[in-house]
Amino acid sequence: MAEVAYVNASRVYPGSPPVRAVDELKLDVADGEFLVLVGPSGSGKSTALRMLAGLEDVDEGAIEIGGKDVTNVPPKGRDIAMVFQSYALYPHMTVGENMGFALKLRGVSKPDIKAKVAEAAKMLDLEKYLDRKPKALSGGQRQRVAMGRAIVREPSVFLMDEPLSNLDAKLRVETRANIAALQRRLGTTTIYVTHDQVEAMTMGHRVAVLKDGLLQQCDTPRALYETPANAFVAAFIGSPGMNLKTVPLTAAGAQLDGLEVPLPRTTLDKVGADGLKEVTFGVRPESLGLVGAGEDGMELTVELVEELGADAYVYGSVRIADQPERFIVRVDGRTPPALGQTVRVGLRDHSEIHLFNPETGARIEG
Amino acid sequence: MSLDAASIKATENAAIAKPTGHVKRSRLASFGLHGALTVASLIAVFPVFWVFITSLKPDAKAAETTPTLFNESSFDNYANVLAGEKGAFLSWFANSAVIAILTTVISVFLSATAAYAVSRFRFPGYRGMMLSFLLIQMFPFAVLIVPLYNILLMLGLQGTSFGLVLVYCTTAVPFCAYMLKGYFDTIPRDIDEAGRIDGLSPFSVFWRLVLPLSKPGVAVTAFYAFLTAWGEVAFASAFLSASDESKTLAVGLQVFVQQNRTEWGHLAAASILVAIPAVIVFYLVQKFLVAGLASGAVKG
Ligand SMILES: Nc1ncnc2c1ncn2[C@@H]1O[C@H](COP(=O)(O)OP(=O)(O)OP(=O)(O)O)[C@@H](O)[C@H]1O
Ligand SMILES: [Mg+2]
């Protein structure tokens, strides 16, 4: 067990211009914590993880594991175990040999290896397959072997790079829960990479959002959802995504088509001080709702209805400054509006809105 | 859609009939297929068969205007050749074996390590190295004899078996390295990295993971290196000393072909004896020539 720290760590690939795949990443992970690195493709998640594993050079800054600087320590000296997206099982070894390989290299005695492998196999329901080669296993079983190989070593840190992306949707949800439970049981510090924000939100104690190699925000799932630090995080976290529109400001608030959203005095003062004429206004689909004709709201022309059973998501357009703007609204699944219908949409609660600086994207605290 | 269903069905059938790999075929198609294969095998086997038939006949009866299967046939030619009546056959055989085995071992080791380096690392001179591997293949042997002779002379290796082994390695290593690089490239790097995290040093990654996974590739290159040395004539006659005992088989066979008389029966018998080790080597490596050893490493 150990805590992990990225100390302004950067990975710069040479080229013109050089690619800063991970840019001055500063992140502290507590002992026993499950931290998820999430971001769109190419945001540097894998690179960050591989830097921690010692598979990628650290060009600037440092990496610490258990309080020790391991920046120049080779992978085998870092006491880590990694689960690869491709699983990377050794094809010429049986499942048992795959799982016990690291112990064998460390000179652990044969009976001890056998006991440890058996224990891990039991945990992962792999006992039947110990003598098989990886190619005779299903994708889900291979995934479990890859997990087993990591567990058997009892490392101080687990690293996982999209370990579920090769599984089908149902198995993924199941395995997601298993991994989270396993981590809780073992209490091993875990860094988990995914591009799937649902995975991130459901598994992580804390979630770090990356974009273009830069850390956008690192916080608990709830905090990310409720107070995203910038427009990117706001749009990235949540499914379907937050409605984000850049709208003009009035004396009393933000002006959306027929709907003027009043803003608190403090917010307006702050925005005024920055000299902004517009703000990026964000509201989550569940913070919007259908309202009656007399109430505050905007006219939405329904273009698509996604029925999910209990809820339905209505996709439609609202004209803001004569431009059609796409909005997503969550409505009761039993009475969804029909396609092409025009409905009135209003805010459920005036506090459930997010404002961002339209130039920098930074959150404007209200 | 129907195509998909059909192909899925076909895969299922293939999977069910795994042991034999049979797919149901019509009688006519089956007959045609077997017929074509039989004809092809006959064409391939016939020359070897005829050499064998010839090797049983006395020299005088070996090449006749009306060929017969048997004509005073016996194993006398073999006895003569092995007894060394026509030249030191057994020393030639030993020379060839030593040279071929040394060439195989050295060039497989050198080319595998070189191929691993060019497959996994990028270093200055990488392109030049790969290009030179290819360029070397382009020179005809004859052009190389004089410069190689001079180099061997300088090294004091002219006339020695080891000198000849080095010469064979210069042709085998680049080719084998090229082949093995292609093979190593198909092994996912994730496996290397998993190995390094599990505690392997870079050399052990090569030795314990990459090499075992490349058995088919290594087998093919070993076979190639062996054949390079086993059947070669030009270098062997130029670089080995002229004494009869130091010849290799391929060079030695020339004693049966004299200016105005060819001892066909003995030549054929010696050829069969020469071919046997090559066949044995092929037999040893062929079980590795099954593809798909690396399958199952990663989700495919
Ligand atoms: N060898 C390299 N040379 C130059 N740039 C590279 C190299 N390897 C990666 N990059 C760049 O670094 C950035 C981060 O890559 P990385 O693999 O970490 O992304 P990722 O977040 O894991 O994406 P994904 O979700 O697709 O796996 C990308 O923009 C990529 O193009
Ligand atoms: Mg990645």
Image (cartoon, rainbow, N blue to C red):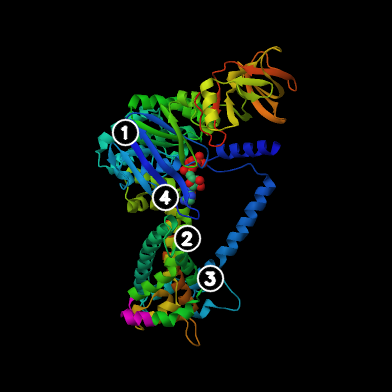
- CB at disc 4 and ligand 1 closer than 8 Å: no
Q: Is residue A140 above or below residue A253?
A: below
Secondary element at tag 1? loop
Residue B170: % across, % down: 41, 71
Secondary element at tag 4? helix
Q: At label 2, which amino acid type do we have?
A: Met
What's the magenta region? B150-160
Quadrant assignment for the N terminus of chain A: top left
Give the foreground label among 2 and 3: 2
**What's the CA distance linking mark 4 and mark 2?**
15 Å
Q: At label 1, which amino acid type do we have?
A: Glu
**What's the CA distance linking mark 2 and mark 1?**
46 Å
Q: Is residue A338 above or below residue B93?
A: above
- Residue beneath disc 4: B213
Q: Residues within 10 Å of mark 1 (few under 14, many from 20)?
A: many
Residue under the point 47% across and 82% down: B257
Q: Nearer the viewer, residue A240 or B251?
A: A240
- The circle on residue A3 is 1
Residue under the point 65% across and 26% down: A327
